Image (spheres, rainbow, N blue to C red):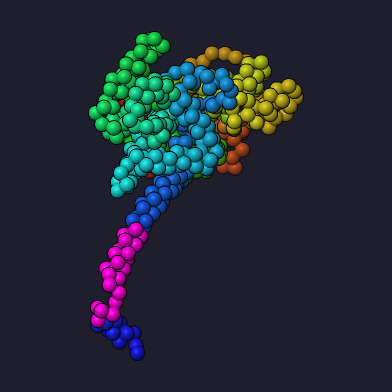
Protein backbone atom coordinates (compact mmCIF):
# COMPACT_ATOMS: atom_id res chain seq x y z
CA UNK A 1 0.00 0.00 0.00
CA UNK A 2 1.50 3.31 -0.95
CA UNK A 3 1.39 6.51 1.10
CA UNK A 4 -1.55 8.03 -0.74
CA UNK A 5 -3.74 4.93 -0.18
CA UNK A 6 -2.74 4.89 3.49
CA UNK A 7 -3.76 8.52 4.02
CA UNK A 8 -7.00 7.95 2.14
CA UNK A 9 -7.89 4.95 4.28
CA UNK A 10 -7.31 6.91 7.44
CA UNK A 11 -9.52 9.74 6.23
CA UNK A 12 -12.38 7.26 5.62
CA UNK A 13 -12.16 5.37 8.90
CA UNK A 14 -15.52 5.31 10.69
CA UNK A 15 -15.72 7.69 13.61
CA UNK A 16 -16.79 4.81 15.81
CA UNK A 17 -13.38 3.23 15.46
CA UNK A 18 -11.76 6.29 17.14
CA UNK A 19 -11.86 6.70 20.92
CA UNK A 20 -14.56 9.13 22.02
CA UNK A 21 -13.20 12.70 22.31
CA UNK A 22 -9.76 11.68 21.14
CA UNK A 23 -9.95 13.71 17.96
CA UNK A 24 -10.96 16.95 19.68
CA UNK A 25 -8.35 16.55 22.47
CA UNK A 26 -5.61 15.79 19.96
CA UNK A 27 -6.54 18.84 17.90
CA UNK A 28 -6.60 21.03 21.01
CA UNK A 29 -3.19 19.75 22.11
CA UNK A 30 -1.73 20.33 18.66
CA UNK A 31 -3.24 23.82 18.57
CA UNK A 32 -1.80 24.68 21.99
CA UNK A 33 1.60 23.33 21.04
CA UNK A 34 1.55 25.35 17.82
CA UNK A 35 0.59 28.50 19.73
CA UNK A 36 3.31 27.94 22.30
CA UNK A 37 5.86 27.27 19.58
CA UNK A 38 4.81 30.39 17.68
CA UNK A 39 5.04 32.48 20.84
CA UNK A 40 8.47 31.12 21.67
CA UNK A 41 9.62 31.74 18.12
CA UNK A 42 8.25 35.30 18.19
CA UNK A 43 9.98 36.09 21.48
CA UNK A 44 13.19 34.48 20.25
CA UNK A 45 13.11 36.40 17.00
CA UNK A 46 12.49 39.69 18.82
CA UNK A 47 15.28 38.99 21.27
CA UNK A 48 17.82 37.94 18.67
CA UNK A 49 16.80 40.68 16.30
CA UNK A 50 17.39 43.23 19.06
CA UNK A 51 20.82 41.81 19.80
CA UNK A 52 21.50 41.65 16.08
CA UNK A 53 20.49 45.29 15.71
CA UNK A 54 22.84 46.23 18.55
CA UNK A 55 25.69 44.43 16.80
CA UNK A 56 24.87 46.16 13.51
CA UNK A 57 24.87 49.54 15.27
CA UNK A 58 28.27 48.78 16.79
CA UNK A 59 29.76 47.64 13.48
CA UNK A 60 28.34 50.65 11.66
CA UNK A 61 29.68 53.11 14.22
CA UNK A 62 33.09 51.43 14.27
CA UNK A 63 33.45 51.53 10.48
CA UNK A 64 32.20 55.10 10.26
CA UNK A 65 34.66 56.52 12.78
CA UNK A 66 37.63 54.24 12.06
CA UNK A 67 37.51 54.29 8.27
CA UNK A 68 36.03 57.68 7.42
CA UNK A 69 36.46 59.98 10.41
CA UNK A 70 39.48 59.01 12.55
CA UNK A 71 40.56 62.65 12.34
CA UNK A 72 37.41 63.67 14.21
CA UNK A 73 38.41 61.47 17.14
CA UNK A 74 41.94 62.88 17.12
CA UNK A 75 40.46 66.38 17.20
CA UNK A 76 38.46 65.58 20.34
CA UNK A 77 41.39 63.88 22.09
CA UNK A 78 43.81 66.74 21.57
CA UNK A 79 41.64 69.21 23.49
CA UNK A 80 41.63 67.40 26.81
CA UNK A 81 44.14 65.81 29.16
CA UNK A 82 42.58 63.11 31.33
CA UNK A 83 44.50 62.62 34.58
CA UNK A 84 44.44 59.44 36.63
CA UNK A 85 44.30 61.18 39.99
CA UNK A 86 41.76 61.47 42.77
CA UNK A 87 41.98 65.26 42.69
CA UNK A 88 41.02 65.28 39.02
CA UNK A 89 37.97 63.11 39.73
CA UNK A 90 36.87 65.29 42.63
CA UNK A 91 37.30 68.40 40.51
CA UNK A 92 35.01 66.93 37.86
CA UNK A 93 32.21 65.81 40.18
CA UNK A 94 32.21 69.13 42.00
CA UNK A 95 29.88 70.42 39.28
CA UNK A 96 26.47 69.14 38.09
CA UNK A 97 26.96 66.53 35.38
CA UNK A 98 30.47 65.89 36.62
CA UNK A 99 30.26 62.11 36.52
CA UNK A 100 29.11 62.17 32.89
CA UNK A 101 31.92 64.60 32.07
CA UNK A 102 34.52 62.42 33.81
CA UNK A 103 33.31 59.26 32.06
CA UNK A 104 33.22 61.08 28.72
CA UNK A 105 36.82 62.22 29.09
CA UNK A 106 37.77 58.74 30.28
CA UNK A 107 36.54 57.31 26.97
CA UNK A 108 37.96 60.13 24.83
CA UNK A 109 41.50 59.54 26.14
CA UNK A 110 41.45 56.20 24.28
CA UNK A 111 41.00 58.07 21.01
CA UNK A 112 44.79 58.44 21.12
CA UNK A 113 44.89 54.84 19.84
CA UNK A 114 42.49 54.96 16.90
CA UNK A 115 41.10 51.43 16.93
CA UNK A 116 40.74 51.41 20.70
CA UNK A 117 38.96 54.75 20.81
CA UNK A 118 36.68 53.78 17.94
CA UNK A 119 35.79 50.51 19.65
CA UNK A 120 34.95 52.35 22.87
CA UNK A 121 32.68 54.77 21.02
CA UNK A 122 30.97 51.94 19.12
CA UNK A 123 30.26 50.10 22.38
CA UNK A 124 28.73 53.26 23.86
CA UNK A 125 26.34 53.54 20.90
CA UNK A 126 25.47 49.84 21.22
CA UNK A 127 24.55 50.36 24.87
CA UNK A 128 22.46 53.40 23.91
CA UNK A 129 20.47 51.36 21.39
CA UNK A 130 20.06 48.35 23.70
CA UNK A 131 18.83 50.40 26.67
CA UNK A 132 16.35 52.23 24.45
CA UNK A 133 15.01 48.92 23.09
CA UNK A 134 14.40 47.65 26.64
CA UNK A 135 12.13 50.61 27.37
CA UNK A 136 10.09 50.30 24.16
CA UNK A 137 7.11 47.99 23.61
CA UNK A 138 8.19 44.63 22.18
CA UNK A 139 6.78 45.35 18.75
CA UNK A 140 8.51 48.73 18.53
CA UNK A 141 12.06 47.57 19.23
CA UNK A 142 13.21 48.80 15.81
CA UNK A 143 12.58 52.39 16.89
CA UNK A 144 15.58 52.07 19.20
CA UNK A 145 17.83 53.19 16.34
CA UNK A 146 16.31 56.69 16.39
CA UNK A 147 18.21 57.94 19.48
CA UNK A 148 21.38 56.50 17.96
CA UNK A 149 20.77 58.38 14.73
CA UNK A 150 19.99 61.64 16.54
CA UNK A 151 23.08 61.41 18.75
CA UNK A 152 25.27 60.49 15.77
CA UNK A 153 24.00 63.56 13.91
CA UNK A 154 24.50 65.82 16.92
CA UNK A 155 28.10 64.67 17.22
CA UNK A 156 28.70 66.03 13.75
CA UNK A 157 29.09 69.36 15.55
CA UNK A 158 32.74 69.26 16.59
CA UNK A 159 31.98 71.11 19.83
CA UNK A 160 29.55 68.51 21.16
CA UNK A 161 31.39 66.69 23.94
CA UNK A 162 31.09 62.98 24.61
CA UNK A 163 29.66 63.81 28.04
CA UNK A 164 26.30 64.38 26.29
CA UNK A 165 25.79 60.82 24.95
CA UNK A 166 27.29 59.45 28.18
CA UNK A 167 24.75 61.44 30.21
CA UNK A 168 21.91 60.13 28.02
CA UNK A 169 23.11 56.55 28.54
CA UNK A 170 23.26 57.10 32.32
CA UNK A 171 19.70 58.46 32.30
CA UNK A 172 18.52 55.40 30.36
CA UNK A 173 20.31 53.10 32.80
CA UNK A 174 18.48 54.81 35.66
CA UNK A 175 15.15 54.38 33.85
CA UNK A 176 15.85 50.67 33.28
CA UNK A 177 16.82 49.85 36.87
CA UNK A 178 14.15 52.03 38.50
CA UNK A 179 12.68 50.32 41.58
CA UNK A 180 8.98 49.68 42.20
CA UNK A 181 7.03 52.02 39.97
CA UNK A 182 4.32 52.44 42.60
CA UNK A 183 6.87 54.09 44.91
CA UNK A 184 7.09 57.30 42.91
CA UNK A 185 8.03 59.22 46.05
CA UNK A 186 11.49 57.65 45.84
CA UNK A 187 12.27 60.07 43.02
CA UNK A 188 12.23 62.82 45.63
CA UNK A 189 15.58 61.41 46.74
CA UNK A 190 16.83 60.10 43.39
CA UNK A 191 16.47 63.26 41.31
CA UNK A 192 18.85 65.58 43.24
CA UNK A 193 21.60 62.95 43.21
CA UNK A 194 20.98 62.04 39.56
CA UNK A 195 20.99 65.69 38.52
CA UNK A 196 24.32 66.28 40.23
CA UNK A 197 25.94 63.23 38.59
CA UNK A 198 24.32 63.33 35.15
CA UNK A 199 23.29 66.95 34.65
CA UNK A 200 20.15 68.18 32.88
CA UNK A 201 20.03 64.97 30.82
CA UNK A 202 18.20 63.55 33.83
CA UNK A 203 15.11 65.15 32.29
CA UNK A 204 15.07 62.16 29.94
CA UNK A 205 14.53 59.90 32.95
CA UNK A 206 11.69 62.11 34.20
CA UNK A 207 9.96 62.02 30.81
CA UNK A 208 10.29 58.22 30.56
CA UNK A 209 8.86 57.78 34.04
CA UNK A 210 5.97 60.10 33.26
CA UNK A 211 5.13 58.05 30.17
CA UNK A 212 5.30 54.76 32.06
CA UNK A 213 3.49 55.78 35.26
CA UNK A 214 1.25 58.54 33.98
CA UNK A 215 0.05 61.84 35.37
CA UNK A 216 0.82 60.77 38.96
CA UNK A 217 4.49 61.22 38.16
CA UNK A 218 4.26 64.75 36.72
CA UNK A 219 5.13 66.27 40.10
CA UNK A 220 8.75 65.19 39.53
CA UNK A 221 9.09 67.72 36.69
CA UNK A 222 8.36 70.56 39.07
CA UNK A 223 10.64 69.04 41.68
CA UNK A 224 13.51 68.79 39.20
CA UNK A 225 13.10 72.45 38.22
CA UNK A 226 13.21 73.35 41.91
CA UNK A 227 16.36 71.28 42.39
CA UNK A 228 18.09 73.01 39.49
CA UNK A 229 17.16 76.46 40.77
CA UNK A 230 18.34 75.66 44.30
CA UNK A 231 21.65 74.32 43.01
CA UNK A 232 22.10 77.44 40.91
CA UNK A 233 21.26 79.81 43.76
CA UNK A 234 23.38 78.10 46.40
CA UNK A 235 26.27 76.49 44.51
CA UNK A 236 26.56 78.01 41.02
CA UNK A 237 25.95 81.77 41.35
CA UNK A 238 29.03 82.48 39.20
CA UNK A 239 27.55 80.59 36.24
CA UNK A 240 24.92 82.01 33.86
CA UNK A 241 21.46 80.67 34.72
CA UNK A 242 20.90 79.50 31.14
CA UNK A 243 24.03 77.35 31.21
CA UNK A 244 23.31 76.00 34.69
CA UNK A 245 19.86 74.87 33.54
CA UNK A 246 20.93 73.32 30.22
CA UNK A 247 24.32 71.83 31.11
CA UNK A 248 27.78 73.00 32.07
CA UNK A 249 29.79 70.38 30.24
CA UNK A 250 27.84 69.05 27.26
CA UNK A 251 29.17 71.63 24.80
CA UNK A 252 32.67 73.06 24.43
CA UNK A 253 31.58 76.67 23.87
CA UNK A 254 29.67 78.19 26.82
CA UNK A 255 26.12 79.37 26.13
CA UNK A 256 26.16 77.80 22.69
CA UNK A 257 24.31 74.71 21.49
CA UNK A 258 24.54 72.33 18.53
CA UNK A 259 23.49 73.99 15.29
CA UNK A 260 22.27 70.75 13.74
CA UNK A 261 24.66 71.33 10.91
CA UNK A 262 25.76 67.70 10.73
CA UNK A 263 29.13 66.86 9.26
CA UNK A 264 30.28 70.00 7.47
CA UNK A 265 32.53 68.84 4.64
CA UNK A 266 34.94 71.77 4.62
CA UNK A 267 35.29 71.84 8.39
CA UNK A 268 36.11 68.15 8.56
CA UNK A 269 38.54 68.50 5.67
CA UNK A 270 40.53 71.03 7.69
CA UNK A 271 40.40 68.73 10.70
CA UNK A 272 41.68 65.92 8.47
CA UNK A 273 44.63 68.02 7.30
CA UNK A 274 45.56 68.93 10.87
CA UNK A 275 45.29 65.26 11.85
CA UNK A 276 47.66 64.33 9.03
CA UNK A 277 50.06 67.08 10.11
CA UNK A 278 50.00 65.80 13.68
CA UNK A 279 50.90 62.31 12.46
CA UNK A 280 53.46 63.60 9.92
CA UNK A 281 51.72 61.95 6.97
CA UNK A 282 53.09 64.38 4.42
CA UNK A 283 52.41 62.27 1.32
CA UNK A 284 48.76 61.88 2.31
CA UNK A 285 48.41 65.65 2.73
CA UNK A 286 49.76 66.37 -0.72
CA UNK A 287 47.65 63.64 -2.28
CA UNK A 288 44.50 64.84 -0.55
CA UNK A 289 45.24 68.44 -1.56
CA UNK A 290 45.10 67.38 -5.17
CA UNK A 291 41.65 65.85 -4.66
CA UNK A 292 39.87 68.45 -2.53
CA UNK A 293 40.74 71.93 -1.38
CA UNK A 294 39.34 74.40 1.13
CA UNK A 295 40.19 78.00 0.34
CA UNK A 296 41.40 79.04 3.76
CA UNK A 297 44.82 79.99 5.22
CA UNK A 298 44.64 76.93 7.48
CA UNK A 299 44.47 74.62 4.47
CA UNK A 300 47.33 76.44 2.73
CA UNK A 301 49.47 76.22 5.89
CA UNK A 302 49.01 72.45 6.10
CA UNK A 303 49.73 71.81 2.43
CA UNK A 304 52.79 74.08 2.32
CA UNK A 305 54.19 72.46 5.46
CA UNK A 306 53.81 69.03 3.86
CA UNK A 307 55.49 70.25 0.65
CA UNK A 308 58.39 71.67 2.66
CA UNK A 309 58.94 68.39 4.47
CA UNK A 310 59.11 66.62 1.11
CA UNK A 311 61.40 69.36 -0.32
CA UNK A 312 58.76 70.12 -2.91
CA UNK A 313 57.80 73.64 -1.82
CA UNK A 314 60.05 75.40 -4.34
CA UNK A 315 58.76 73.18 -7.16
CA UNK A 316 55.03 72.90 -6.48
CA UNK A 317 53.97 75.63 -4.08
CA UNK A 318 51.81 77.53 -6.56
CA UNK A 319 50.31 74.37 -8.01
CA UNK A 320 48.00 74.55 -4.99
CA UNK A 321 45.74 77.24 -3.61
CA UNK A 322 47.59 79.99 -1.74
CA UNK A 323 45.52 82.20 0.53
CA UNK A 324 47.92 85.16 0.43
CA UNK A 325 50.71 86.39 2.67
CA UNK A 326 49.38 84.13 5.44
CA UNK A 327 49.63 80.95 3.34
CA UNK A 328 52.86 79.76 4.98
CA UNK A 329 52.35 80.98 8.54
CA UNK A 330 49.19 82.53 9.94
CA UNK A 331 49.18 85.50 12.31
CA UNK A 332 48.13 84.88 15.90
CA UNK A 333 44.44 84.04 16.09
CA UNK A 334 42.75 83.41 19.41
CA UNK A 335 40.93 80.17 18.73
CA UNK A 336 41.68 76.54 19.44
CA UNK A 337 42.51 75.37 15.91
CA UNK A 338 43.80 78.00 13.48
CA UNK A 339 47.36 78.32 14.79
CA UNK A 340 48.21 74.61 15.02
CA UNK A 341 49.79 74.15 11.55
CA UNK A 342 51.66 77.45 11.98
CA UNK A 343 52.97 76.26 15.35
CA UNK A 344 54.16 73.04 13.71
CA UNK A 345 55.92 75.06 11.01
CA UNK A 346 57.63 77.25 13.60
CA UNK A 347 58.78 74.14 15.46
CA UNK A 348 60.36 72.53 12.41
CA UNK A 349 61.91 75.80 11.26
CA UNK A 350 63.66 76.23 14.61
CA UNK A 351 61.60 79.25 15.72
CA UNK A 352 61.04 77.55 19.06
CA UNK A 353 59.78 80.58 21.01
CA UNK A 354 57.11 81.28 18.42
CA UNK A 355 56.05 77.62 18.43
CA UNK A 356 55.70 77.73 22.21
CA UNK A 357 53.73 80.97 22.12
CA UNK A 358 51.31 79.66 19.47
CA UNK A 359 50.77 76.40 21.35
CA UNK A 360 50.23 78.21 24.63
CA UNK A 361 47.70 80.59 23.06
CA UNK A 362 45.91 77.63 21.48
CA UNK A 363 45.61 75.85 24.81
CA UNK A 364 44.36 78.99 26.55
CA UNK A 365 41.72 79.37 23.83
CA UNK A 366 39.95 76.15 24.85
CA UNK A 367 36.80 77.82 26.13
CA UNK A 368 35.75 75.11 28.58
CA UNK A 369 39.03 75.54 30.44
CA UNK A 370 40.49 72.09 29.75
CA UNK A 371 44.12 71.30 29.07
CA UNK A 372 45.39 69.88 25.81
CA UNK A 373 47.62 66.82 25.80
CA UNK A 374 49.03 67.73 22.39
CA UNK A 375 49.75 71.35 23.33
CA UNK A 376 51.18 70.48 26.75
CA UNK A 377 53.60 68.03 25.18
CA UNK A 378 54.82 70.54 22.58
CA UNK A 379 55.15 73.30 25.21
CA UNK A 380 57.31 70.96 27.29
CA UNK A 381 59.46 70.19 24.24
CA UNK A 382 59.98 73.88 23.53
CA UNK A 383 61.07 74.43 27.12
CA UNK A 384 63.50 71.52 26.89
CA UNK A 385 65.10 72.91 23.71
CA UNK A 386 65.41 76.34 25.33
CA UNK A 387 66.94 74.86 28.48
CA UNK A 388 64.09 75.84 30.83
CA UNK A 389 64.17 72.54 32.67
CA UNK A 390 62.31 73.48 35.84
CA UNK A 391 59.27 74.79 33.99
CA UNK A 392 59.48 71.82 31.61
CA UNK A 393 59.44 69.48 34.61
CA UNK A 394 56.08 70.93 35.69
CA UNK A 395 54.56 70.10 32.31
CA UNK A 396 56.10 66.64 32.37
CA UNK A 397 54.75 65.99 35.86
CA UNK A 398 51.27 66.73 34.52
CA UNK A 399 51.71 64.43 31.53
CA UNK A 400 52.98 61.60 33.74
CA UNK A 401 49.52 61.46 35.34
CA UNK A 402 47.92 60.64 31.99
CA UNK A 403 47.77 57.27 30.26
CA UNK A 404 49.15 57.70 26.76
CA UNK A 405 51.58 60.58 27.37
CA UNK A 406 53.10 59.00 30.49
CA UNK A 407 55.89 56.98 28.88
CA UNK A 408 57.04 59.92 26.75
CA UNK A 409 57.02 62.21 29.80
CA UNK A 410 59.14 59.77 31.80
CA UNK A 411 61.68 59.53 28.98
CA UNK A 412 61.79 63.31 28.67
CA UNK A 413 62.20 63.66 32.44
CA UNK A 414 65.25 61.41 32.31
CA UNK A 415 66.57 63.36 29.32
CA UNK A 416 66.60 66.78 31.02
CA UNK A 417 68.87 65.45 33.74
CA UNK A 418 71.74 65.20 31.26
CA UNK A 419 72.54 68.22 29.09
CA UNK A 420 74.75 66.24 26.75
CA UNK A 421 71.88 63.90 25.86
CA UNK A 422 69.79 66.86 24.76
CA UNK A 423 72.61 68.30 22.66
CA UNK A 424 73.05 64.96 20.89
CA UNK A 425 69.33 64.24 20.58
CA UNK A 426 68.38 63.85 16.88
CA UNK A 427 65.51 66.35 17.17
CA UNK A 428 66.22 68.60 20.15
CA UNK A 429 69.91 68.87 19.39
CA UNK A 430 69.21 69.84 15.79
CA UNK A 431 66.66 72.49 16.84
CA UNK A 432 69.22 73.99 19.21
CA UNK A 433 71.46 74.48 16.19
CA UNK A 434 68.70 75.98 14.04
CA UNK A 435 67.09 78.37 16.54
CA UNK A 436 67.95 82.03 16.95
CA UNK A 437 70.86 82.69 19.27
CA UNK A 438 69.39 85.94 20.61
CA UNK A 439 65.89 86.89 21.71
CA UNK A 440 64.21 89.85 20.04
CA UNK A 441 60.75 91.14 19.17
CA UNK A 442 59.34 91.19 15.67
CA UNK A 443 56.05 91.85 13.94
CA UNK A 444 54.19 89.41 11.73
CA UNK A 445 54.53 91.78 8.76
CA UNK A 446 58.31 91.19 8.82
CA UNK A 447 58.06 87.42 8.61
CA UNK A 448 60.16 87.26 5.44
CA UNK A 449 62.98 89.11 7.20
CA UNK A 450 62.77 86.77 10.19
CA UNK A 451 63.04 83.76 7.89
CA UNK A 452 66.04 85.34 6.19
CA UNK A 453 67.77 85.89 9.55
CA UNK A 454 66.99 82.29 10.49
CA UNK A 455 68.70 81.13 7.29
CA UNK A 456 71.74 83.33 7.93
CA UNK A 457 71.91 81.92 11.47
CA UNK A 458 72.30 78.42 10.00
CA UNK A 459 72.63 78.08 6.24
CA UNK A 460 71.90 74.33 6.51
CA UNK A 461 68.28 75.14 7.41
CA UNK A 462 66.77 74.28 4.05
CA UNK A 463 63.20 74.66 5.31
CA UNK A 464 63.99 78.26 6.29
CA UNK A 465 65.42 78.78 2.78
CA UNK A 466 62.26 77.51 1.10
CA UNK A 467 59.99 79.50 3.43
CA UNK A 468 62.09 82.64 2.93
CA UNK A 469 61.64 82.58 -0.83
CA UNK A 470 58.05 81.42 -0.55
CA UNK A 471 57.16 84.34 1.73
CA UNK A 472 58.72 86.86 -0.66
CA UNK A 473 56.72 85.43 -3.54
CA UNK A 474 53.50 85.51 -1.54
CA UNK A 475 54.10 89.20 -0.82
CA UNK A 476 54.94 89.87 -4.47
CA UNK A 477 58.49 90.95 -3.63
CA UNK A 478 59.95 90.01 -7.00
CA UNK A 479 62.90 92.35 -6.62
CA UNK A 480 63.96 90.60 -3.43
CA UNK A 481 63.41 87.22 -5.07
CA UNK A 482 65.80 88.07 -7.91
CA UNK A 483 68.29 89.65 -5.52
CA UNK A 484 68.58 86.60 -3.27
CA UNK A 485 68.11 83.88 -5.86
CA UNK A 486 71.78 83.04 -5.60
CA UNK A 487 71.18 81.80 -2.04
CA UNK A 488 68.90 79.12 -3.42
CA UNK A 489 71.63 77.95 -5.76
CA UNK A 490 74.27 78.14 -3.02
CA UNK A 491 72.44 76.53 -0.06
CA UNK A 492 69.44 74.79 -1.58
CA UNK A 493 71.25 71.68 -2.76
CA UNK A 494 69.32 71.77 -6.07
CA UNK A 495 70.84 70.18 -9.17
CA UNK A 496 68.83 72.62 -11.26
CA UNK A 497 66.62 75.59 -10.55
CA UNK A 498 63.30 74.41 -9.05
CA UNK A 499 60.35 74.37 -11.43
CA UNK A 500 58.45 76.88 -9.33
CA UNK A 501 61.31 79.38 -9.47
CA UNK A 502 61.63 78.85 -13.23
CA UNK A 503 57.95 79.69 -13.56
CA UNK A 504 58.41 82.89 -11.52
CA UNK A 505 61.35 84.00 -13.67
CA UNK A 506 59.31 83.32 -16.80
CA UNK A 507 56.47 85.36 -15.34
CA UNK A 508 58.88 88.24 -14.61
CA UNK A 509 60.31 88.15 -18.12
CA UNK A 510 56.83 88.19 -19.64
CA UNK A 511 55.81 91.01 -17.27
CA UNK A 512 52.98 88.90 -15.87
CA UNK A 513 51.54 88.03 -19.28
CA UNK A 514 52.25 84.31 -18.98
CA UNK A 515 49.19 82.13 -19.71
CA UNK A 516 49.32 78.83 -17.87
CA UNK A 517 51.78 80.14 -15.27
CA UNK A 518 50.71 79.11 -11.72
CA UNK A 519 52.45 82.12 -10.19
CA UNK A 520 50.94 84.53 -12.72
CA UNK A 521 47.50 83.15 -11.87
CA UNK A 522 48.18 83.72 -8.17
CA UNK A 523 49.32 87.32 -8.73
CA UNK A 524 46.30 88.06 -10.91
CA UNK A 525 43.92 86.65 -8.29
CA UNK A 526 45.52 88.61 -5.45
CA UNK A 527 45.41 91.86 -7.45
CA UNK A 528 41.74 91.26 -8.16
CA UNK A 529 41.00 90.66 -4.48
CA UNK A 530 42.82 93.86 -3.48
CA UNK A 531 40.87 95.91 -6.03
CA UNK A 532 37.59 94.46 -4.76
CA UNK A 533 38.47 95.56 -1.23
Q: 412 or 288: nearer the eye?
A: 412
- Residue at the location (39% across, 21% down)? 189
The answer to whether residue 30 is visible is yes
- Residue at the location (50% across, 33% down)? 107
Q: Quadrant of residue 135?
A: top left
Q: Quadrant of residue 413?
A: top right
Q: Position of residue 25 (x, y in %)?
A: 30, 67
Residue 35 belongs to magenta span: yes
Give the position of the C terminus as an image quadrant: top left
- Residue at the location (45% across, 27% down)? 100
Classify residue 465 as left or right of residue 334: right
- Residue at the location (35% across, 17% down)? 227
In the image, is residue 206 above or below residue 90? below
Q: Position of residue 348 (x, y in %)?
A: 58, 29
In the image, is residue 149 above or below residue 354? below
The answer to whether residue 256 is visible is no
Q: Quadrant of residue 255?
A: top left
Q: Position of residue 243 (x, y in %)?
A: 35, 18
Give the position of the N terminus as an image quadrant: bottom left
Residue 521 belongs to magenta span: no
In the image, which residues are magenta? 14-37
Amino acid sequence: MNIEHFNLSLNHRPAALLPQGAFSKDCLAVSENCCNFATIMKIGIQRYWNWGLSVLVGIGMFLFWYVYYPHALSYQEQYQLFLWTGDYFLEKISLPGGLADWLGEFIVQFYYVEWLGTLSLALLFMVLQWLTARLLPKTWWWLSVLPVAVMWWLMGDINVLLSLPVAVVLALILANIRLAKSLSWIDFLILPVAYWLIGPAVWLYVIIQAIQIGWRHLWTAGWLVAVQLMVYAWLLPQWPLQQAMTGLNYYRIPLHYPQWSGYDKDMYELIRQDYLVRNERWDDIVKRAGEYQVRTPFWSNCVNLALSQKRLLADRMFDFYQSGEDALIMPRTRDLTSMLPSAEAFWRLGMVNSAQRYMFDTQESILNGKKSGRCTKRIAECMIVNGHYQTAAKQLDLLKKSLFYRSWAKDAEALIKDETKINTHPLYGRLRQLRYKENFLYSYEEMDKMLGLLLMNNNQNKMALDYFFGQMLLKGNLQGFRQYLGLAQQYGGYRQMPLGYQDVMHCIQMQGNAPGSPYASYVKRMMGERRSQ
